[in-house]
Image (cartoon, grey):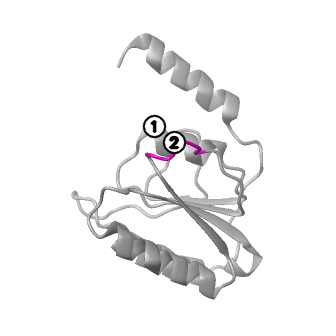
Amino acid sequence: MGFTRKLVRAFALRAHRSKVPTRLMPLSEIRSAVVYVNAVEPYCEPFKLKLKEFFNKRGIELKIIGEFDKDLRTDSDFFLSLNPKPCINERYAASSSTARFKAGRHQLKGGVYDLVVSDTTPEPVAMKEAFEVIEKMLNNIK
């Protein structure tokens, strides 16, 4: 990647970084959520249905985004990235999100996420398995 491209990305990330303070929040305080997924992962569509079921059951409005979406800047109470490998689009979406609680699978520069669930194996696990662990943790936050 060229120097100019890296410089432009760094300025964009800094310019659009959210200033909203974040913290761990119980599900009862969350009214809206944005989930960043890897849309090219096999079985992504059935997994999106599981996400919708989980959040709808709790009365939480859900928006699912991915790296091919044009508008990555979002406004919600909760931001969750289930992307197995960090990428610039996820970093931008997480950094610019005005969510008060952010969770992901790997910490980004600047300590963006309040909750991080890392893979224990060298190969990344599927989004479904990562979400099952995050779901248990979310249900335990009071």
| Amino acid type indicated by mark 2 | Arg
User: Taking 100 as reference, is 91 above or below it?
Assistant: above
x and y percent of residue 40 in the render?
A: 31, 56
Instruction: Name the residue carrying label 2.
Output: 91
Does dot 1 land on a helix, a strand or a loop? helix
Does dot 2 land on a helix, a strand or a loop? helix
Disc 1 + disc 2, Cβ < 8 Å: yes
Q: Residues within 10 Å of mark 1 (few under 14, many from 20)?
A: few
Using the rendered view, name the quadrant where residue 46 is placed. bottom left
The residue at the far bottom in this view is: 57
The residue under the point 51% across, 42% down is 91
Marking on residue 88: 1
Q: Which of 113/83 is in front?
A: 83
Residue 133 appearing in the image: no
The quadrant of the picture occupied by the C terminus is bottom right
| Amino acid type indicated by mark 1 | Ile
The residue under the point 59% across, 79% down is 55
x and y percent of residue 128 in the render?
A: 36, 73
Q: Residues within 10 Å of mark 2 (few under 14, many from 20)?
A: some
Query: Mark 1 to mark 2: distance in Å?
Result: 5 Å
The residue under the point 44% across, 61% down is 82
Image: magenta residue range: 68-72
The quadrant of the picture occupied by the N terminus is top left
Q: Which of 42/10 is in front?
A: 42
| Residue 115 drawn in magenta | no
Predominant SS along the magenta part: loop
Does residue 32 appear to the left or right of 81 in the view shown?
A: right
Marking on residue 22: none
